[in-house]
Image (tube, rainbow, N blue to C red):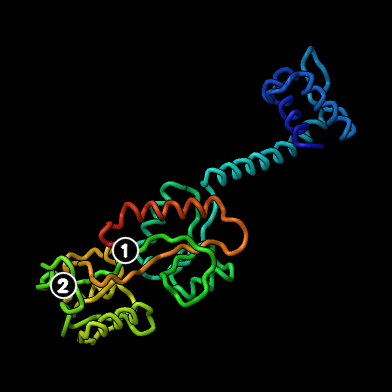
Amino acid sequence: MNLRQLEAFRAVILGQTVTRAAEMLHISQPAATRLIASLEADIGFELFDRVKGRLQPTPEALTLYQEVQRSLIGVERIARTAQDIRSLKRGSLHIACAPAMGLIFMPRVIASFMAEHEGVHVSLVVHSSAQVIELMVGQRCDLGIIVLPNTYPSPRSEQLIATRMLCALPASHSLCEKPVIVPEDLRGEAFISYPHSIGSRQQIDTIFAAHGVERELRLETQLSQPMCEFVEHGLGVALVDALSAVNYRGDGIVFKPFEPAIEMDFAMLLPVHGPVSKLHTAFLEHTQAFIERHVPKAYRFTA
């Protein structure tokens, strides 16, 4: 037996004539007749009696029809699933993301993506860039988002955005009037810093050392969001990544360009082995478009 035979059998049961069955299947009447004849030959018994020009199903045919109907419904469900996958309405994404993008910005991206792709299941976990790379290499997630540069070998990736770090100032600070902040402006300022375990800390310390500027280092945190909260509460100034600045919702803080520019890039890691799926590509393109719409040009790094 094959699928086309079973479809013809069901069509004849429903249409009661071969002519109607052929119309339902968009085939010729002789083709429909041959499908029924070949099915009867395969199963070894007759399925229909001719009564006054109509095909009357035999008791055996009605028993068989119940099973055929269940089977074809399953096939149609598979076809709908395939269509959903093709149109990106079905599938799952397990995303691992560095905190700078994963705490606020990526949830906004995912919400926007899911609004356009109903039926897609998304899982988001937040880890350090090194852990994200380990998850991708171990094939324990579908996509990863990391901060560059990093000291770990990473799988294939696509750059999402090159940003520049910004100077976060309390809204009442006198430096808010300056268009650009330079290291000398922050001499003697209470400075909220990343801990030494964060790569950006070394870059920032090197720049201030090169300019001979001493800061008052009393407060550290590894995340930009609490760093911004500390700045708004008047505990000091800070250099933060641009995406955290975009997402900060407080109104007691001002973000200013900082020179010399400190680049902070974000990249999306793609599956290490095998081809990239249509769903992966769609999410990458959606993320890039979302960034283009929501991250100001002034926050981006240009060489």
Between the C-alphas of marks 1 and 2, the distance is 24 Å
Q: Nearer the viewer, residue 48 or 166?
A: 166
- Determine which quarter of the picture holds residue 260: bottom left
Q: Nearer the viewer, residue 223 or 289?
A: 289
Q: Say which quadrant the N terminus sits in.
A: top right
154 sits left or right of 31 in the view: left
- Residue at the far top in the pictured view: 52
Residue under the image location 56 percent in, 68 percent down: 140
Mark 2: few/some/many CA within 10 Å (<14, 14-19, 20+): many
Q: Nearer the viewer, residue 51 or 282?
A: 282
Mark 1: few/some/many CA within 10 Å (<14, 14-19, 20+): some
Amino acid at dot 2 = Pro
Question: Of the residues tagged 1 and 2, which is closer to the observer?
Answer: 1
Q: Position of residue 279 (x, y in %)?
A: 52, 52
Residue under the image location 70 percent in, 40 percent down: 70
SS for callout 1: loop
Q: Are marks 1 and 2 in contact (CB under 8 Å)?
A: no
170 sits left or right of 13 in the view: left
Q: Say which quadrant the C terminus sits in.
A: bottom left
Amino acid at dot 1 = Phe
Residue under the image location 54 percent in, 50 percent down: 278
Q: Which mark is residue 24?
A: none
Q: Position of residue 68 (x, y in %)?
A: 74, 37
Label total for image: 2
State which tag comes first along the sequence, 1 or 2.
Answer: 2
Relative to 249, say whether 119 is above or below. Answer: above
Q: Position of residue 186 (x, y in %)?
A: 17, 79
Residue behind mark 2 = 170
Relative to 178, say whether 11 is above or below. Answer: above
